[in-house]
Image (spheres, rainbow, N blue to C red):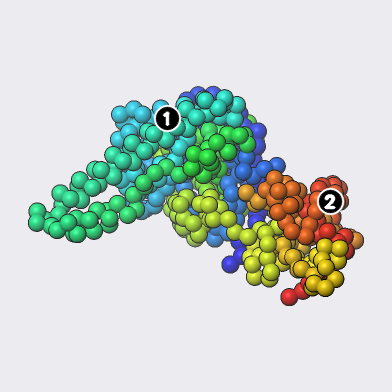
Amino acid sequence: MIKQFAMVLLLGLAIGGCTGSEEALEEGQLIEGEGKADRLECSGIRPPDSSGFEKRVAITLDDGPKAQTTPLILDVLKAFDIRVTFFVVGRMAATEDGRQIAKRAVKEGHLLGNHSFAHPNMAGLKSAQLARELLDTDQLIREIIQGARQEISSATLLALAPNASDEEKEAALQDALSDIQTEPRFFRFPGGNSSCAAAKYVRSQGYAVTGWNFGPFDYCYNAGNGVCKGKRADQIQPARLRKDMIALTLRQAKQADGGILLLHDSKNYTAKTLRLLITTLLADGFSFVNLDDESTFPRLNGIIPPFVGDACDSDAICAFGFEDEEGSCLRYKAPVSDASPEVEQEIFGHCSLSCEGRCPDQIFSAPTFCASLDKGLTGNCLSLSDEANDYCAGLPGTKAAKVARHLGKSSASKKKAVVCKPVDLAPTIVSD
C-alpha cells in the first residue's frame, strides 16, 4: 500500500519552556497546513513518519519515572499487554525509586527513551551542556537496561533444572531476553525545543529524534482535575472537548489515523484515565505498537523510502504518494550538447509527483517545490537545490534554476525558488 503524506502540521512550533521540573509544555494538537517544513530533520516535534499508520498507535510517556504514577501506568499496560516507550528524565531515573521503576519497565518489555537529564530547553544550550544532558542520561539508561537484563538472566537460569546443558541454558536465555531492550535508541527534546545543530548532535550519538503525531495536553487536564483551562484550552476545539480528554484523544487519533501519541507518566490524571483511553481507542479499531515497529515508523527506524528526486527508471520505483497523486518516474533525455551525435542520448529519471501549488517533504531528502515543465499546463514536484543533492550536482541531467511556483487551481501563494530542473527547458519526457 502506498503511504500517503498527510498535509498536517503539528501545533506548537514555538513552545514555551518548562516552568517546573515536571511541567513540560508539550503540544500535539493537529491543525491543517501546507505540509511543508523549513527542515524536517531540525524539528524536535514533527516526526519523520506522518502517515500510513493504518490506525496503529505508539504510546509514549514523558517526564518520569515517578513513584506515585508510573507503577500504576505499568499495571494498566500489563493488563492490556501493550508495550510503550518511556522517555525518562535522567534526574528522575537516578533516584532509587526511579531506577527500580525504570528497571521494571524494561523487564516488562517496554523501551526507555532519552529525555535529557534535567529537562532544559536544549535548543539554546552550548555544546558541552548539550552533550552532558544527552550522555549522562544515556549512561544511566544503559546501566538500568543492563541491570534488568542481568536480573532476567539470573531468574531464567535459576528456573532451569540443575543438570541443564549449556545449549539448554543458552536457548533459555535467548528466549527470555529476545524482547528486552539492549540499548536506548530514541531521544525526545524537552518541550520539542530543538535546533538544527542540536538535532544533528543527537543523531551523531546514534539516537533517532522522536517527535509526536498527536497528544491531548494531558498536563493541562491534570492541572484542572479533568478540565483543561487557560491558554491551552483555547487551542482545543470544539470547546466541549476541554472537559473530555479521552474524546479529544480519539478525535486526534482519527485525524492522524494513528501514529505517535504523547502523554506524561508523571501526571496523576493520565495514570487515572489511561485504562479508559486505551479501551476507547481499541473499541474504535485502533491497535498498539511500539516505536521500534519498522512497518509503522520506517523513517524513524532509519528506513528511508523513495522520494522526489531519487533516481528511477520506472514508475514502480517511485512508490509514494501525496493526497490523491501517486509518485511517478519523470524521465527525460540529456540535451544534445551533452551527447555525442554518434551516441544515443542518455536517459535520466527522477521520482516526481503531479502537483498544484504544494508538494510534500521527507526527512533527510531535499525539500521540494511545485513547478511547471510545460509552460504552465501541469505541475511537477521537483527537488530544491540543496545540500542533500549537492546543489543539483547529485541529480544528473539537471541544473539549478530559479522558477515560479505552479499554482494550478490551488490557493497556494506565488513564490519563486531554485530547483533542480532538467537542463533542457522543454525536456523530452519519455513514457513507459
Q: Residue at x 19, y 47 (%)?
A: 155
Question: In this orientation, which residue lies closer to the viewer: 163 or 93?
Answer: 163
Q: Mark 2 points at which residue?
A: 401
Name the residue furthest left: 163
Residue 253 against residue 245 in the figure, above or below = below
Q: Can residue 257 be seen in this view?
A: no
- Of residues 270 and 166, the one drawn nearer to the viewer in this rendering: 166
Helix, strand or loop at label 1? It is helix
| Dot 2 amino acid type | Ala
Q: Give the mark nearest the N terminus, 2 or 1.
A: 1
Position of residue 164 in the picture relative to residue 128 (left or right): left
Please tell me the numbered disc located at residue 136: 1
Residue 412 horizontal/vertical position (percent): 81, 50
Q: How many marks?
A: 2
Residue lying at 15% horizontally and 49% vertically, measured from the top left: 158
Q: Residue at x 79, y 67 (%)?
A: 332
Q: Few, some or many C-alpha atoms within 10 Å of disc 1 (few <14, some 14-19, many ≥20)?
A: some
Q: Indicate left or right for 367 with 296 as reference.
A: right
**Amino acid carrying mark 1 in the image:** Asp
Residue 343 vertical placement versus 117 (above, below):
below
> As displayed, is residue 229 above or below residue 395?
above
- CA gap, disc 2 to disc 1? 47 Å
